[in-house]
Image (cartoon, rainbow, N blue to C red):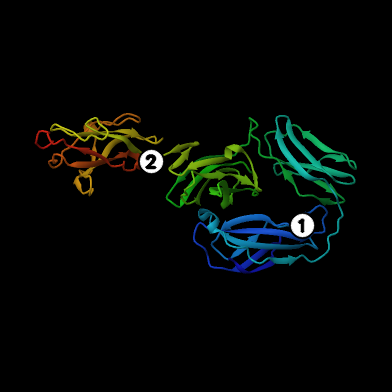
Amino acid sequence: MPQNLRAAIRGNPEDVILDFDAPIPVKPSVWQLQRMILVDPRPGVEKNVWSNVFSIDATSTRIVDDTVELHPGAEICWRTRSWNPDAALAGVSGWSEPACVKVEGQLIRQFDWPSNVTVQNTPDGVNVAASGGEGDFTLERRVDDGAWEVVRVFADNEPLDFTDTNVRGQRVCYRFSQHGAYSEETCSDVVIDDGSVALTIKNITRLDDDYIKVTGNCPLRQEDGYLIYFRQFERDGVVDYWRAGSMPCTNGPFEKTLYAPVSTAACLFIELRSAGLLWDATSKLCLPSDALALVDGVPVYPIQARDLQTNGHVVPNDLSGRRISFDALVDLGGNQTDVAKYEIEVAEATSLELIWAPGIQFFPYREVQQNGERTSPIVYRGPELQLGVTYSWRIRLHAEANAATVWSNWVNFTLAVESARGRTR
């Protein structure tokens, strides 16, 4: 459990630095941060309630809260704990003692413009809506990164809910002005010609057990966006997610290697978000835990052989005759490649001591094996097999372009005692 939590205001713009004493827990543990407002001079602000801020990888005993709003006269507290999602409840430590800061000064309200502003793309244009506000105020607009211009002036208590037309295909930002002061701007999503959000994750590729590569496209036209990726886990029977990392996300394609270890969960979910809000359903993809990649949203699995048969039987225990042959069903796993080679091993069933392992071989006539069809027969050409003894064999397909392949499971076969003696060449 984190001890001696300390909080200090730093920087311009200001943020809060939190330091504490604790051993660094094992991966994939995270620090979970919560915040509570004790005093705030603004009306309508919820107080004395702990709320989640974020969770980050537990790689340091310092957390920077750059999301807090520090208003003069406010008093705010933080607390943290360690949490290992893979260990369920056993991986959750106790909360640290709170650390608090008091913001010096006094809040003086010189303006009161509308709040709860929403800006949404619609088929008819950009809809702007807000509530509240006292006195007259002006709504201003800028397209892309152009100059601000006045849209209209609103009278005291006049409702704000209208559609700004002739701006489709562009990113539009709005703000209020009152008594010479300006509100924060609120912007629309980038809209492309068909009116949909141009936000996509194109491919997810697993590089190894710890890292994945994500490629896609970000629609933002300024440095105010980021990609956050989330890993799914299960806690108390409920599926949940934790924030595993982030990266800048600006206009155009991106490629990023991210830390996302293999989990027992069915999926690794990847989401694109900006300012904490989910942009679009197409930006959320699931990489199955046993898949190598998602290519245009379709899972790709290792190439493997399935449904192994010996002399046309699944698990024969009474093979007879001099010729033993093996074949299997080809499963390319969604890979766009050719398979013309194989690797086979035959072993004694109990000890799995290898009897025949000829290495990587071409199929007869170097014939390319087709997905969903059975391979060409592979004739056994190893040492003489003993009657009544059970043997095992397995196979691994080899593909062009270094596509990932895996060994099949071992399957057994037995030569009948009454079989004619003789080597199965």
Indicate the quadrant where residue 78 lies.
bottom right
Where is residue 394 drawn, in percent x and y? 27, 41
Query: Camera-side residue: 371 or 240?
Result: 240
Give the quadrant of the C terminus.
top left
State the image quarter where residue 107 is shown. Answer: bottom right
Reply above or below: 155 against 97: above
- Which numbered marker is on residue 264? none
Which amino acid, by three-letter code, is at mark 1? Lys
> Looking at the picture, does residue 182 appear above or below residue 164?
below
Q: How many marks?
A: 2
Instruction: Give the alpha-carbon distance from disc 1 to disc 2, as whole Å.
Output: 53 Å
Outermost residue, left side: 421
User: Residue 18 at what x, y percent from top left?
Assistant: 64, 65
SS under mark 1: loop
> Where's residue 374, x and y in %?
29, 30
User: Residue 1 versus residue 284: which sits nearer the camera?
Assistant: 1
Which residue sits at x=54%, y=44%?
Answer: 269
Can residue 422 be seen from the camera position used here? yes
Q: Position of residue 286 (x, y in %)?
A: 52, 41
Q: Secondary structure at mark 2?
A: loop
Residue 221 visible in the current orientation: no
| 178 left or right, relative to 374 | right
Q: Residues within 10 Å of mark 1 (few under 14, many from 20)?
A: few
What's the residue type where badge 2 is placed? Pro
Give the mark toward the camera: 1 or 2: 1
Q: Which residue is mark 2?
A: 302
User: Image check: 357 left or right of 134?
Assistant: left
Characterize the local packing of mark 2: few (<14), some (14-19) or many (20 or more) Cα atoms within 10 angstroms. some
Q: Which residue is mark 1?
A: 47
Compared across the picture, whether 94 is left or right of 350 comes to right
Q: Are marks 1 and 2 in contact (CB under 8 Å)?
A: no
Name the residue located 57 percent from the left edge and 62 percent from the top edge: 93
